[in-house]
Image: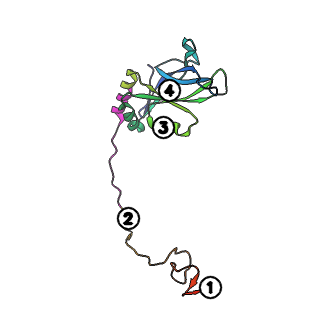
Amino acid sequence: MVQLETSKSQSMPMGIVIRRLPGVTRWAKWVWKPVSVLPGAGEAEWQILRQEENAVEYHAATLPLELHRTDTEAYRTALSEKTPSLYVVLRESDSPARPMEVLLVTASPYEGQDYADTGEEIVEKVPMPPGVIAWIDKFVRQHHEDERFIKRRRDKANTGKIEDGVGDARIRQLTDVYRTPGSRRGKRLQ
């Protein structure tokens, strides 16, 4: 595995395997789903890995899986799941040679959720291989620092102050703001 390291981040090339299945409706000819990753994979562009009847698996792209020390809390969350997973983000493409564009692979469930919120991309969980789990766990143990809890303190403003019928201070009022709108001292205005 090739790893690029700095004091703040690490990176590993990750091959993205995408499965194409026939669509179940007339509006979607094909269903595309990321199914696995290949740690340390070389460059590839929509290389066929396996084909069974109408199902085809492609090594669609190789992207860097980047770990940043500021995101260790998110990585801990991913590692604590029943099945630790990476998140692969896809977007439809106009090119017939590349039907889907692979945008990102991340170990942060928070970043995956951010992409899922837009609804324009396909975000899928892919199980982490054991070697990737060990690599991310080592990175988290090296760089994670628990944030110290700091209790907020209220300012010294007087919150018990009573405003007797004043209303909005920006609007000049001659009398009580709670008066009946159609009357003035018991007489109707005409």
Magenta-tinted stretch: 135-153
Single out the mark in the foreground, 3 or 2.
Answer: 3
Q: Amino acid at mark 3?
A: Gln
Task: Give me the C-alpha separation between circle 3 and circle 2.
Answer: 35 Å
**Residue tagged by mark 2?**
155
Residue 117 circle label: none
Pointer 1: residues within 10 angstroms few (<14), some, or many (20+)?
Answer: few
Q: Amino acid at mark 2?
A: Asp
Single out the mark in the foreground, 4 or 3.
Answer: 3
What x and y, as percent, mark residue 99? Answer: 62, 24
Task: Give me the C-alpha separation between circle 2 and circle 1.
Answer: 47 Å
Single out the mark in the foreground, 4 or 1.
Answer: 1
What x and y, as percent, mark residue 5? Answer: 43, 28
Query: 119 above or below 46?
Result: below
**Residue tagged by mark 4?**
64
Q: Are marks 4 and 2 in contact (CB under 8 Å)?
A: no
* Image quarter (top left, top right, bottom left or bottom right) of the N terminus: top left
Please name the residue shown 42% across and 37% down the image.
71
Single out the mark in the foreground, 2 or 1.
Answer: 1
**Residue tagged by mark 1?**
189
Single out the mark in the foreground, 1 or 3.
Answer: 1
Query: 60 above or below 51?
Result: below
Residue 113 circle label: 3
